[in-house]
Image (spheres, rainbow, N blue to C red):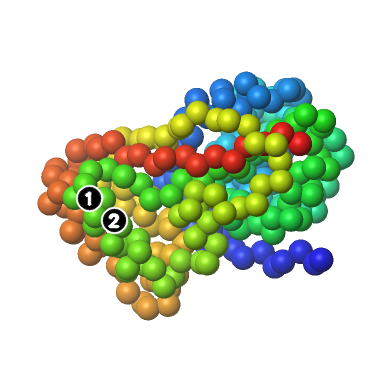
Amino acid sequence: MPTPAFADHFSAQAEDYARHRPGYPRALFDALLDVTPGRQRAWDCGCGNGQVARDLAADFEQVVASDPSAAQIAASSAVGGVHFLQAGAAPTPLATASCDLVTVGQALHWFAHDAFFNEVRRVLRPGGVLAAWCYSLLRVSPKIDALLERFYRERLGPWWPTERALVDDGYRDVAFPFDTLPMPELTLEVDWDLAQLGGYLSTWSAYRRCRAETGLDPLPGLLGQLAMPWGDPSQTRRVRWPLHLRVGRA
């Protein structure tokens, strides 16, 4: 079956993506290390600007970070032990049985799953691990959450790619042909002021499509609505995303 065309939703905002997207908790990587048999090589597929790869580099001799977007890779910063590669999810030039761990952070929904899973089986060493995860809508406080929910589902609803439904479902509907490994419940958390929240929202693909196709920018209106429940815009608030993990052994 031919590889589907690359649907590029993020190259245009690659620098903003690198600047405004939150990082992942150390507890996530500790949990993966607990079930991964080796530390020689990890492959981070759909790496974006290298957030996951930078954390993996602390624990693996080599990390291969691949993404089909040249702009995303260009927005990454050099890290010792990380080799950036412009490539899709499958096929790849990685050698057979060359990886101990394959990670996919917030990107599995863009892949042709059968082809990718076959590639994972090929590149993983015996007993190697695949870990895919996503985070859906953020949570701050009930009043703020209600406004964000309406913006996400009603204002931007028509501009979300269909693949986004897999994220909303926490990847539960993704057929996962690996022996599932239990993982702890994990949450991604940051402390942001209102401007930082706005920067993150500006990286949403649906927001970019809405603005491009309508000629209107819906974000200032939302930030105006958020101003009252937020309070002092320079005040930081705890922002949380539950992480949804699918982890399995080859």
Residue contact between numbered discs 2 and 1, judged by CB atoms under 8 Å = yes
Q: What residue sits 80% from the left and 53% below the top? A: 91
How crowded pointer 2 is (Cα within 10 Å; few <14, some 14-19, many 20+) is rated as many
- Amino acid type, callout 1: Ile
Query: Farthest residue toward the bottom?
Result: 214
User: What is the spatial separation of the Cα atoms under label 2 and label 1, in whole angstroms?
Assistant: 6 Å
Q: Is residue 30 left or right of residue 61?
A: left
Depth order, front residue of 136/226 = 136
In percent of width and height, residue 100 lies at 75, 30
Query: Which residue is found at the position 30% from the left and 57% from the top?
Result: 149
Q: Quadrant of residue 90?
A: bottom right
Q: Is residue 99 left or right of residue 232?
A: right
Examine the rendered structure and indicate whether residue 240 appears above or below residue 106: above
Q: Position of residue 175 (x, y in %)?
A: 65, 52
Q: Is residue 219 visible?
A: no
Point out which mark residue 148 bears.
2
Classify residue 96 as left or right of residue 39.
Answer: right
- On-image quarter of the C terminus: top right
> Quarter-wise, where is residue 189 in the image?
top left
Which amino acid is tagged 2? Leu
Report if residue 96 is visible in the image: yes
Where disc 2 sits, the SS reads helix
Q: Which numbered tag is attached to residue 144? A: 1
Q: Residue 123 in the image: x percent, y percent?
A: 81, 40
Residue drawn at 55 percent across, 39 percent down = 245
Query: Circle 1: is it few (<14), some (14-19), or many (20+) Cα within 10 Å?
Result: some
